[in-house]
Every structure is written in C-alpha cells, then in structure tokens.
Amino acid sequence: ARLRIGLTGGIASGKSTVAGILADLGAVIIDSDLLAREVVEPGTEGLAKIIERFGDRVISDGRLDRAALGKIIFSDPRARADLESIIHPAVRRRAAELEAVAGSDAVVVQMIPLLVETGQADAFDRLVVVDVPPEVQRQRLADRNGLTEQEAEARIGAQASRADRLAVADVVIDNSDAGLDQLRQRVTEIFRSWQSEHANG
Ligand code: ATP
C-alpha cells in the first residue's frame, strides 16, 4: 500500500523547502494550503457554503474576499469554527482523491502547517516535523517576509509550541543550521529508508 506521511513544522521552519526536495526524489506532495484555496474557488460547493453562511459581504468580483472574511473570523470564534467546518472536510476529501490516484507504491506526503493544532497527528503512517528554534523562525520571517521581531513572535506564538510538535514526531528534521546541501542529504536518507521499508513489506 501507499506510505502516508504527514509533514509539518512551525512557520518558516522549512516545510516547503523539504517538500520540494521530496518532490524531486519522487514523492507525491499534497499541499493542504493549496487545497484550502482550491476548495473555495468560484463554482465550488465550498464557496457556495461560505456565501450561505457569511453572505455576499465576503465576495468581491465573484471571488472569495479573504481580507473581508479574515476580519469577520478574527474576532468571532464561532464564525471561525463555522468556516473551518466548511473548509477542513473539503480539504480532506480532495486530499483523499489525490492520494487515491497516486500509484499503489507511492510515498504520499501531505504538508499540513497546522497538523498538530488540528489534531491530525494519528492520521498518518509517519509524522515528520521540520524543526528549528524560535530565533531561527524569527530570523527567517525577518529575511523572507520583512516582519519585525514582535510580528514574528505573534505568529510563532499563535501556533503549537515546538515541544508539542516534537512530542508527536516520528522523524525530526533539524533545519536550524543545516545548509541546503546538508538538508537535501538528510531528506534523501529519510526518503530512501521509507522506500526500502516499503519494498520489504
Ligand atoms: P511557511 O510556514 O511560512 O509556509 P515553510 O515552513 O514552508 O514556511 P520555507 O518557506 O521552506 O518554510 O522556508 C522559510 C525560509 O527559510 C525560506 O526563505 C527558505 O528559503 C529559508 N530556508 C529554509 N531552509 C533553509 C536552510 N536549510 N538554509 C537556509 N535557508 C533556509
């Protein structure tokens, strides 16, 4: 059967970088952030449900107005929960479809930033956590997104703690001072071990 891998890590830890390396090695990558956008494209059942719940004020030019929706859910936990109960099942269905069309011997990697926060730690054969200390996250958020230290801290603090993620990891990829070559080497080793495990049963 397919090997199902969950890939997560804190903000700016290097999830996309690791997923890119895994894709080069031949893994099937399912990006949950991408799916979350896909399931609310114009014409989808997801968007219809959002309009039913929130009204036309969240639509602009026929598309979901994320800023408007963001303002509504920011201060309203019920609204946020309703939105999640529309989007999360749709993402899970779409992910299952993509998984089903992957070859029977494929290594399927689902990248889910909030995997731990959304209680999906048990949904996979293996859980991979890309790990960096908060100071590296802050530095990368400053370099990549131009965030101040306070802004970076707020985003890091809104997620599960580093310890919570590490507690559920089967494999930890330390991406704190790995150069990209070293990271590629580590990810390749892990991927090869999955493949041989796979071949043996
Ligand atoms: P997000 O949570 O914001 O989606 P992410 O976890 O997917 O981020 P990436 O986008 O892969 O993280 O990496 C964050 C930033 O750190 C990027 O600018 C990336 O190029 C850089 N980066 C990742 N890994 C390394 C590394 N080993 N060495 C140097 N820079 C790295």
Image (tube, rainbow, N blue to C red):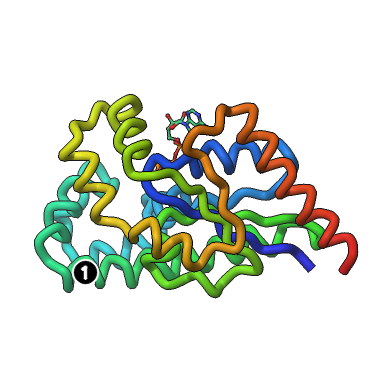
User: Residue 146 appears at what percent x and percent y?
Assistant: 25, 26
Residue labelled 1 has its Cβ within 8 Å of some atom of ligand 1:
no
Which residue is rendered at x = 32% and y = 31% of the image?
A: 139
Looking at the image, which is closer to me, 64 or 105?
105
Which residue is rendered at x = 27% and y = 46% of the image?
A: 62
Badge 1 amino acid? Arg
Which residue is rendered at x = 47% and y = 38% of the image?
A: 176
Pointer 1: what residue? 53
Q: Quadrant of the N terminus?
A: bottom right
Does residue 82 sit above or below 192 in this rendering?
A: below
Disc 1, SS: helix
Image-based side of 98 in relation to 116, left or right: right
User: Residue 130 appears at what percent x and percent y?
Assistant: 51, 48
Looking at the image, which is closer to me, 141 or 91?
141
Does residue 21 sit above or below 71 in this rendering?
A: above
User: Residue 153 appears at what percent x and percent y?
Assistant: 22, 44
Does residue 125 sit above or below 43 in this rendering?
A: below
Looking at the image, which is closer to me, 150 or 52?
150
Image-based side of 199 in relation to 89, left or right: right
Does residue 196 sit above or below 145 in this rendering?
A: below
Which residue is rendered at x = 88% and y = 60% of the image?
A: 199
Looking at the image, which is closer to me, 118 or 70?
118
As drawn, the residue found furthest toward the left would be: 75
Figure quadrant of residue 78 = bottom left
Is residue 45 visible to the viewer in this orientation of the structure? no
User: Residue 175 appears at what percent x and percent y?
Assistant: 51, 40
The quarter of the rendering in which ligand 1 is drawn is: top left
Determine crowd level at label 1: few under 14, some 14-19, many 20+ residues with C-alpha closer than 10 A.
few
